[in-house]
Amino acid sequence: MQTQLTSDLLKTAKGQRIDEILRKCVHCGFCTATCPTYQLTGDELDSPRGRIYQIKRLFEGQTADHNTQLHLDRCLTCRSCETTCPSGVNYAELLDYGREQVNHDVKRPLEQQAILNLLNYVLPYSSRHSLMFKALSKVKKILPKSIRGKIPTIKPLKQYRAIARQNFQTVYLLEGCVQSTISPNTNQATLHVLNTMGYQVIREAKPKCCGALSHHSGKEEQSNSFILDQLNTWLEIDQKTPLSAIVSTASGCGVMLKDYHRLLTTEQKELYQNVLNKICDISELIDVEALKPKLNVHKNDIAYHAPCTLNHGQKLADELFNKLTQLGYSLKQPKDAHLCCGSAGTYSVMQPELSKQLQHNKLNALAQTGGTKIVTANVGCEHHLASISHLEVKHWIEMLADDLNQN
């Protein structure tokens, strides 16, 4: 793609990076075939190629307007286009730059501002959203159906039998700001599986946000604060007790954690490089040989929903599928498995109509697999699908821990 970015912008490292990404795009349009929003709206401006053109014009000097903001907001940041793109365009990174510029140029309607401010004030802080969810649960029956579905049903905390640890490697388990409140059994299950494989686990004393919500909402100051808070905590722990891994179980958080390196300054990257290299998804630690003899696997078919953040963001969906299959699970992938379920962080709140269409499409595809339950790898997808699903939806690590506990 030919570009004519402003001369002032090209003098900066940021501008040079934007130009580099834009020039990789060859207009081929392969991305449109796998873009969830383009498939729903049929509007070129709601496709990756169309959004790239809009972002290009922004940095060539054209002023953004509410229409530009709308089409960039409609993007799920699912990264399906990155998986498809033969030229290796770093679309999500470019989108971050584009959204930052649009948020600078265009003032949001008051209603949108209020919702985003509320979400960013409450959700990243477990103490705040815990109180909110408890209060809303008490009046859930009288709330509109559209709101009821977003209030999680908190399940009783599971207790797993104690396991004698053997290999003495130590890992740090990230509990997740929202996950620790609405899906605490995911963390309990992860602890049990890690202990079964011999790991010593240090758990987060107080769950912290990874910064994803504020980052994707354009609140960079808040996001940077969360990022540095996480990194300083890891560094302090690693200096006291050397860690072999820093483990995330929510793939949405995991893809943000693995993006830290591009959000830091050169000096910060040098300071935190050791702990940055230890970030991993729980699926990367699963040892099939160690776990298989200890499992009591039920032979029912299971519908497998790979979150976009695991599939396109971290490129781990196939690895997890293969490991679970090797462990004896009968997993069934839905048609168009690459498409988003519509959760996408705050997307279901900010873009409810598109989100609902994607949610229904995904659940219909999962039901057609014949699976007796649905497993996924991200708390957002789990809650979003479970809110209207007639099938049980759970994190795959809970399924694994339950089957270990029964043996």
Image: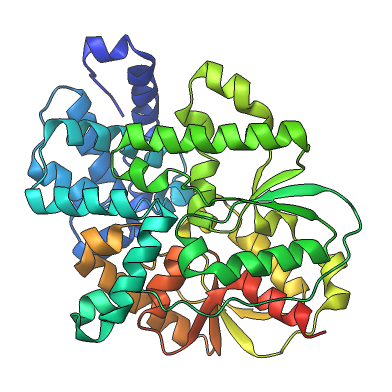
The single residue placed furthest to the right in the displayed view is: 166
Identity of the residue drawn at 90% across and 53% down: 167
Q: Where is residue 164 in the image (x, y as percent from the top left)?
A: 88, 65
Q: Which quarter of the figure has residue 376? A: bottom right
Which quadrant of the rendered structure holds the N terminus?
Answer: top left
Q: At 24% across and 10% down in the image, what residue appears? A: 8
Query: Is any atom of residue 150 visible in this view?
Result: no
Q: Using the rendered image of the protein, determine whether residue 84 is visible from the camera's viewpoint.
A: yes
Q: Position of residue 327 (x, y in %)?
A: 77, 74
**Residue at x 87% of width, y 66% of height:** 289
Q: Can you give x and y, in whole percent of width and height, for residue 36 in the image?
A: 32, 62
Horizontal arrangement in the rendering, residue 331 relative to residue 2 (left or right): right
Say left or right for 64 vs 18: left
Residue 358, placed above or below residue 227: below
Return the x and y of residue 319 as percentages of the image width and height.
67, 60
Count of picture labels: 0
Residue at left 81%, top 79%? 295
Q: Quadrant of residue 270?
A: top right
- Quarter placement of the C terminus: bottom right
Front-lying residue, 209 or 341? 209
Residue 208, compared with residue 249, is above or below; it is above
For residue 53, side relative to residue 254 (left or right): left
Q: Which of 215 and 94 is in front in this view?
A: 215
